[in-house]
Amino acid sequence: PSVYSTFERSLDVQLNPVWLWTGSLLRPVASRMKLVGDQLFLRLIDAIQVHRVNSATDWTLEASFAAPAVSLAFDPLGCFDIDGQTILDARAGIVRVYRRGAQGWLLETTLPDRAPISASFAWGASVSVRGDRAAVGANWEPAGSLTGYVRVFHRDAAGQWTLEADLEHPSLSTSITGFGISVHLTDDRLFVGAHRDHASGPSSGAVHVFQRTGTAWSIL
């Protein structure tokens, strides 16, 4: 599937992974690319590549970010998002923020989970960045319960990221919702997918919308 935005001049494509047999492991090679303006972002198994168009047919590799090593028989490809000069890259339970400045693309920070990385690598199941805010979903947490949560972070003028909100399903009595399987940030709203939500029937799924007022987030 792919999504094209004429407003942001972007193309977001989820690819069918290309698989390679490497030693004793079957690994996917690429899963996603995003075209934004004159830049192409490609998610590989071991890196994110940034290509920039110099002419109608000439593309140049501008940067490549190494992905963390994963000691699993199945190597998850993770996910990423881009907004302006910021890349949010999640893989193997580690969420990294890269920022483009005078020295090019550099690692700015990593965004922390509630607890140490779990075997399910649920932290970073979904990510979204908008300006100086980032949302990260953990749909399989806590401890594989599939209850899920989403953490929202804010970057200040000095480039420091701090936790702004820790969001859960609006019904605390509801379990196994998959809350945080997908997230999307706008300037003042956050859309959170819950693929196992029972809102319209067993595991029918739902999208929950949160509104930001200043630094406070509330469910609509």
Image (cartoon, rainbow, N blue to C red):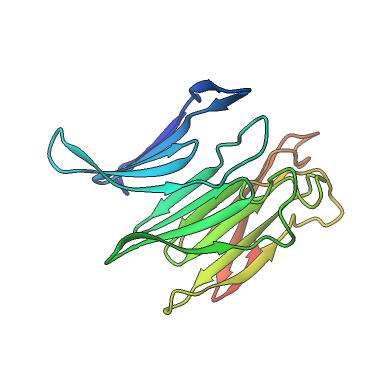
Viewer-side residue, 184 vs 213: 184
- Splitting the image into 4 quarters, where does residue 115 fall? bottom right
State left or right for residue 73 relative to residue 203: left
Residue most extreme to the left: 55
Residue most extreme to the front: 23
Q: Is residue 183 visible?
A: no
Indicate the position of residue 205 as horizontal and vertical percent values. Answer: 70, 38
Viewer-side residue, 54 vs 193: 54
- Splitting the image into 4 quarters, where does residue 2 fall? top left
Indicate the position of residue 140 as horizontal and vertical percent values. Answer: 74, 45
Viewer-side residue, 18 vs 37: 18
Q: Residue at x 64, y 52 (%)?
A: 137
Q: Is residue 96 above or below residue 177?
A: below
Q: Residue at x 60, y 55 (%)?
A: 136
Residue most extreme to the right: 173
Indicate the position of residue 220 as horizontal and vertical percent values. Answer: 64, 60
Q: Is residue 86 above or below residue 164?
A: above
Indicate the position of residue 138 as horizontal and vertical percent values. Answer: 68, 50
Q: Residue at x 30, y 43 (%)?
A: 6
- Splitting the image into 4 quarters, where does residue 51 fall? top left
Q: Residue at x 58, y 62 (%)?
A: 111
Q: Is residue 15 visible?
A: yes
Number of numbered discs overlaid on the protein picture: 0
State left or right for residue 9 relative to residue 108: left
Residue most extreme to the bottom: 158
